[in-house]
Image (cartoon, rainbow, N blue to C red):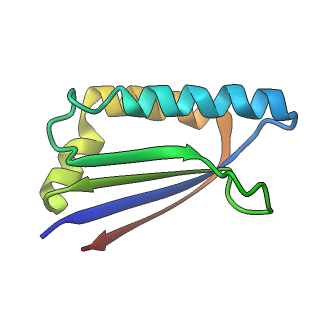
Amino acid sequence: MTIRHIVFWKLSAVTPRKKADDAAGVVSRLEALVGVVPEIRALTVGPDVAGDENWDMALIVDVDDLDALARYQAHPDHKAAGAFIRTVVTDRLAVDLQV
């Protein structure tokens, strides 16, 4: 079994430059978890490129099972990334799928 953890964010920044800077900060912090958080099997993160009224960013993380997801979320480096993300977003949506 694999669990696919999918998260969408709305960034709080109003200007395109600030949104891009904040998105880059989110991307760099989450990509830095690969190789550090052992539960991560695959990770993709980035800003929406369509520019419509969609969510501003998305994250997709694959882990082995729900226990691995819990360990990923409890990992100190993930918590540090999350602390930064909470400072630059206004809304979050998450879903966990069995794939």
User: Tag count in the figure?
Assistant: 0
* Residue at 69% from the left image edge and 25% from the top image edge: 21
Look at the picture and state if 66 lies above or below 78. Answer: below
Look at the picture and state if 78 lies above or below 72. Answer: above
Q: Residue furthest right?
A: 15
Locate residue 71, reporting x and y percent.
Answer: 18, 44
Locate residue 25, reporting x and y percent.
Answer: 57, 26
* Residue at 24% from the left image edge and 64% from the top image edge: 3
* Residue at 47% from the left image edge and 44% from the top image edge: 45
Picture quadrant where residue 29 is located: top left
The N terminus - image quarter: bottom left
Left or right: 42 in relation to 66: right
The C terminus - image quarter: bottom left
Q: Residue furthest bottom?
A: 98
Locate residue 28, reporting x and y percent.
Answer: 48, 26
Look at the picture and state if 69 lies above or below 3. Answer: above
Picture quadrant where residue 11 is located: top right
Look at the picture and state if 96 lies above or below 11. Answer: below
Locate residue 26, reporting x and y percent.
Answer: 54, 32
Left or right: 76 in relation to 94: left
Q: Residue furthest front?
A: 49
* Residue at 13% from the left image edge and 56% from the top image edge: 67
